[in-house]
Amino acid sequence: EAQVTQNPRYLITVTGKKLTVTCSQNMNHEYMSWYRQDPGLGLRQIYYSMNVEVTDKGDVPEGYKVSRKEKRNFPLILESPSPNQTSLYFCASSLGAGGDTQYFGPGTRLTVL
Amino acid sequence: SQQGEEDPQALSIQEGENATMNCSYKTSINNLQWYRQNSGRGLVHLILIRSNEREKHSGRLRVTLDTSKKSSSLLITASRAADTASYFCATVRQGTYKYIFGTGTRLKVLA
């Protein structure tokens, strides 16, 4: 089944404790992206990747890192999480960039205390 | 950062009625997409309309695009309780690979 998976689905952590949210897709998509969703603000793009080893900042990249060492995986790293990073995070992938249909993962609800 | 805007923010209708929601955006685009989100779950793609198209249909969905006004509308005809969800428009800023999502319209269809 074609899908985007994220882990963990729920995470409660404390300020400053490094964490990684994994994202994997099995559709051989080139474009992958991370979003955060906050009430009243819609989805905001954090980082995206055009292909292996090619990443770029979205609109809200501060406090996040990403890597794309393999085509299928695109982990999101929070090296020193802070309470303002409490949010619902989505990973998405698409065949290409420039407006192709995106396929979304189920989301990761992160709480930083 | 620039964001799309959906209007209205929330809409409540009776089953069988039509639901119309609007999206405005700020930059030139290649295409515009509509997505649906059920209660905190992942978004699901509904329909894509290209910048050279004015109207597109898919089942009970009708999308229009007016590039001169930088706006789009999504019409859901003969709505059902299962259509209850949030609906988002999304564009890619022309010349970039960055997606911009609107703030969404929360639709509630009453049985």
Image: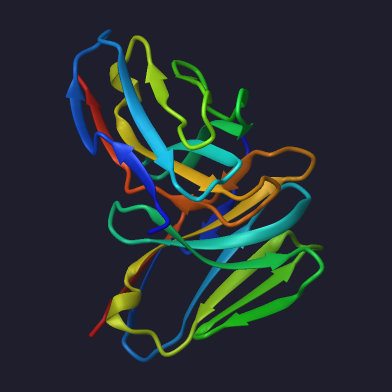
The image shows residue B70, relative to residue A73, as above or below, that is below
Classify residue B86 by image quadrant. bottom left
Q: Position of residue A112 (x, y in %)?
A: 23, 21
Residue drawn at the location 78% of the way across and 63% of the way down: B51
Q: Position of residue A54 (x, y in %)?
A: 64, 25
Classify residue B68 by image quadrant. bottom right
In depth, the one of A100 and B87 nearer the eye is: A100
In this image, A95 relative to B81: left or right? right
Residue drawn at the location 32% of the way across and 33% of the way down: A87
Residue drawn at the location 75% of the way across and 75% of the way down: B54
How many numbered circles are shown? Answer: 0
Which quarter of the image is occupied by the C terminus of chain B? bottom left
Report whether residue A101 is seen.
yes
Report whether residue A42 is seen.
no
In depth, the one of B108 and B62 nearer the eye is: B62
Residue drawn at the location 58% of the way across and 57% of the way down: A101
The image shows residue A36, relative to residue B80, as above or below, that is above
In this image, A98 relative to B108: left or right? right
In depth, the one of A47 and A49 nearer the eye is: A49
Scheme of colours in the image: rainbow
Which quarter of the image is occupied by the N terminus of chain B? top right
Q: Position of residue A86 (x, y in %)?
A: 29, 28
In this image, B95 relative to B38: left or right? right
The image shows residue A109, relative to residue B103, as above or below, that is above
Q: Position of residue A24 (x, y in %)?
A: 41, 39
In this image, A12 relative to B109: left or right? left
